[in-house]
Structure formats: structure tokens, C-alpha cells
């Protein structure tokens, strides 16, 4: 067990980082003439222990992102998410293999990396078994060859259309990871393209889709993402400090 003072130090460090992040979000919103109230901060807690969740909550955070289905399940068992009556929101933000869909359908509050018809089928089935509707974001591959996962941008709208009969999924928007670069200005165009895809989908005839959330921006590029229309940023390093692995 960590001593009280260690815990306090960890809490203080996270609170200080969150304060800095909030100030940077506000500044980016100012530049874009947007309201910080329209930006949701997801604290990416992957690889960090439950104490990090405590520290994040103490700093006022509610959304936590995990990229491994089993890790999410274990953490959500220790601290149930909102759909299970808890006070945190567990978001699965990483690629999901079909055989692990059951963990996400049961334990996640939201799945932010939906990118194939087969996975949609399986999640819909599993969510039905758990008697719930699973909020999802559709992941788009906006960086081309730099990434393995996500739908090609040109296929995104047709994919959304095809989800119309998946009664146990509720698509709330899109998610993407930009290319990794030293200079976030290099990926401004990718964020612009994502906003275009997000803003031009006509959900009027699709009961399964409402376009509310555009999840773009990570620790190294979130200000540019916000300037280009992001409504949800996913920050690991900027909130919890460096990770030793992915
Ligand atoms: C790890 C991860 C993040 C956060 O990365 P940082 O650079 O630490 O902010 C965001 N999104 C996804 C999908 C991730 O896997």
C-alpha cells in the first residue's frame, strides 16, 4: 500500500497536469471561438493502476480510456462504470478483436473504435445479451499507411448507413488518430478532413446514429484538433505522465 503522503503526491501531480491541460484547452477554444464546455476530456489510463483513476477523479475527471479489453474489464470490475451504476465512464479506445467483444459489451460504457461490419455484428449481439445499448464511435483511418485500424474515409458514411438495423448500438460520432509527427501543424489537414466527414453525414434517416462527438486529438496534437472541430480529446501522457509501454 502506498502511504498517504505518496497518494497525496500522486494526486497533486495529476491535478497540476489537469490544470495545465484545461488551460491549454481553453486557449485553443479561444483561438477557434469555441466554448471549452463543448470539449470532453478523456483521461487515457491504459497501463496505469487504479490509483491513477482515483487521482483523475480527485482532479474532476470522469471519462477514462483503455485500449485493452481485459484491462478495461478488470478495472471496471474494481470500479463499475456509469452504465452499471458507477461514477466513472469507461471508454474502450483501442482496436478490439471480435473474440473480446463480450468484455466490452459487458463492462465498457462506450466503445470508440468500431471499424468493421463483423465487429458491429458481434457487439450488437453481445450488447443484446446484456440487455443494453452500447454507445459507439466509428474509427476512421485518416492517416493512411501510418495506421492499421479504422475505416477508409470514403467508406465511412456507407458503413454508418449499414448500422441502421443494429438496435443495440448507438453511434454518437467518429474517432481518429492522426499521424505521429513532431509538429502538430503537419496533421491539421487530417483533423480538417475528419471534421468534414463528421459534419456532412446525414443521420436523419438512421435511428442508430446521432453525430455529437468527434474524438480527435492526443497529448501531442490536441490543440490543433480542437481548432479544427474536435469535441473529445484523448490524453494519456498529458494527464498521467509518461508510460513505460503502450
Ligand atoms: C494511448 C492512446 C491515446 C493517448 O496517447 P497520449 O499520446 O499519451 O495522449 C489516445 N488515443 C488512443 C487510441 C490511444 O491508444
Image (tube, rainbow, N blue to C red):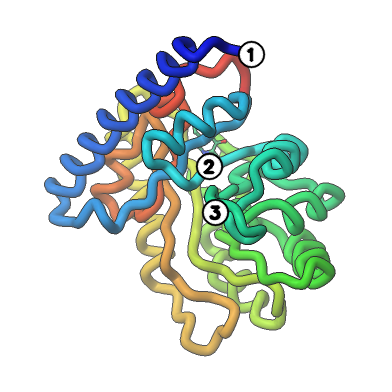
Q: Residue at x 48, y 11 (%)?
A: 6
Q: Is mark 1 on a helix, strand or loop?
A: loop
Q: Is mark 2 on a helix, strand or loop?
A: strand
Answer few, some or many: residues within 10 Å of disc 3's Cα (few below 14, many 20 plus, some between 14 and 19).
many
Query: Which is nearer the N-term, disc 2 or disc 3?
Result: 2
**Residue 203, placed above or below residue 62:** below
Instruction: State which quarter of the image contains the N terminus.
Output: top right
Q: Name the residue under label 1.
A: 1
* Front-lying residue, 222 or 84: 84
Q: What element carries label 3?
A: strand
Q: Provide residue 243's location: percent of width, then percent of height.
A: 54, 18
Answer few, some or many: residues within 10 Å of disc 2's Cα (few below 14, many 20 plus, some between 14 and 19).
many
* Front-lying residue, 81 or 135: 81
Q: Which residue lies furthest to the bottom in this view?
A: 205
Is any part of residue 151 visible from this angle? no
Is any part of residue 115 visible from this angle? yes
Query: Which numbered circle lies on residue 64?
Result: 2
Q: Mark 3 points at which residue?
A: 140
Of badges 2 and 3, the one in the foreground is: 2
Amino acid at each position: 500500500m502506498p502511504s498517504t503522503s505518496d497518494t497525496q503526491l500522486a494526486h497533486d501531480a495529476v491535478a497540476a497536469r489537469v490544470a495545465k491541460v484545461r488551460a491549454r484547452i481553453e486557449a485553443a477554444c479561444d483561438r477557434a471561438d469555441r466554448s471549452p464546455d463543448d470539449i470532453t476530456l478523456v483521461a487515457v489510463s491504459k497501463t496505469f493502476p487504479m490509483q491513477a483513476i482515483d487521482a483523475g477523479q480527485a482532479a474532476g475527471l470522469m471519462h477514462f480510456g483503455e485500449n485493452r479489453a481485459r484491462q478495461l474489464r478488470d478495472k471496471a470490475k474494481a470500479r463499475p462504470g456509469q452504465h452499471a451504476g458507477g461514477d466513472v465512464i469507461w471508454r474502450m479506445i483501442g482496436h478490439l478483436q471480435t473474440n473480446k467483444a463480450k468484455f466490452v459489451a459487458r463492462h465498457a460504457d462506450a466503445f470508440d473504435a468500431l471499424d468493421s461490419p463483423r465487429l458491429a455484428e458481434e457487439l450488437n449481439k453481445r450488447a443484446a445479451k446484456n440487455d443494453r445499448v452500447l454507445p459507439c464511435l466509428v474509427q476512421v483511418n485518416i492517416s493512411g499507411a501510418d495506421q492499421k485500424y479504422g475505416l477508409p474515409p470514403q467508406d465511412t458514411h456507407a458503413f454508418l448507413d449499414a448500422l441502421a438495423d443494429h438496435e443495440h448500438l448507438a453511434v454518437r460520432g467518429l474517432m481518429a488518430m492522426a499521424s505521429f509527427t513532431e509538429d502538430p501543424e503537419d496533421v491539421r489537414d487530417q483533423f480538417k478532413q475528419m471534421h468534414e466527414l463528421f459534419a456532412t453525414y446525414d443521420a436523419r434517416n438512421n435511428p442508430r446514429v446521432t453525430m455529437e462527438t468527434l474524438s480527435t486529438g492526443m497529448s501531442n496534437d490536441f490543440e490543433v484538433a480542437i481548432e479544427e472541430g474536435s469535441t473529445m480529446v484523448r490524453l494519456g501522457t498529458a494527464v498521467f505522465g509518461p508510460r513505460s509501454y503502450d
